[in-house]
Image (tube, rainbow, N blue to C red):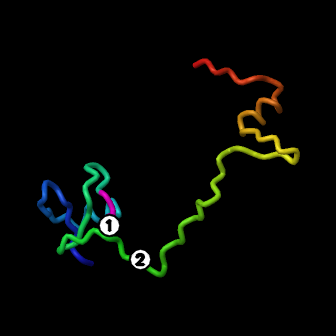
Amino acid sequence: MENLYILINNNYDVIDEKIVEKYELTKGTLSPYTRSPIVNEQGEYYKENKENEEEKPDLSNPDDGVDEMENGLSLSTSEILDIAQGVDSDMTS
């Protein structure tokens, strides 16, 4: 396992191996509290692609909570629930 460093104020501080394991830190991520980059000895920040990594979901067609009916009418999830319950949403908070 290579040593990991945290970049703070243009200085590389080594991260203890126990902390790396506890927070599952890897090169190319940000530290959980300071949001500083985690780098290797050379200061490289890029994350290496691994063959066994999960594929990222296709977000090209996100589910935005709007459903289009057969007649072309578009209703949001909250509007469909209002119709089903026979009430109108309260916009007051």
Q: Are marks 1 and 2 in contact (CB under 8 Å)?
A: no
Q: Nearer the viewer, residue 58 or 84?
A: 58
Q: Specify the quadrant of the image occupied by residue 27.
A: bottom left
For numbered disc 1, what is the local secondary structure? Answer: loop
* Residue at image mark 2: 49
Instruction: Point out which mark residue 16 bears.
Output: none
Q: Nearer the viewer, residue 75 or 71?
A: 71
* Identity of the residue drawn at 22% across and 69% down: 4
Q: Amino acid at mark 1?
A: Gly
For numbered disc 2, what is the local secondary structure? Answer: loop
26 part of magenta stretch: yes
Q: Is residue 53 shown above or below 30?
A: below
* Identity of the residue drawn at 32% across and 53% down: 32
How packed is label 1: few (under 14 Cα within 10 Å), some, or many (20 or more)? Answer: some
Q: Specify the quadrant of the image occupied by residue 20.
A: bottom left
* Residue at image mark 1: 28
* Identity of the residue drawn at 24% across and 67% down: 39
Q: Is residue 88 shown above or below 23?
A: above
59 displayed left or right of 83: left
Instruction: Say which label, 1 or 2, has the lower sequence index.
Output: 1
Q: Specify the quadrant of the image occupied by residue 41.
A: bottom left
Q: Nearer the viewer, residue 87 or 66?
A: 66
Residue range of the region highlighted in magenta in the rendering = 25-30
Residue 46 percent coordinates (x, y): 32, 70
**Residue farthest bottom in this picture:** 51
Q: CA distance from mark 1 to mark 2?
A: 11 Å
Q: Amino acid at mark 2?
A: Asn
Residue 63 percent coordinates (x, y): 66, 51
Q: Nearer the viewer, residue 65 or 31?
A: 65
81 displayed left or right of 10: right
* Identity of the residue drawn at 71% across and 44% down: 66
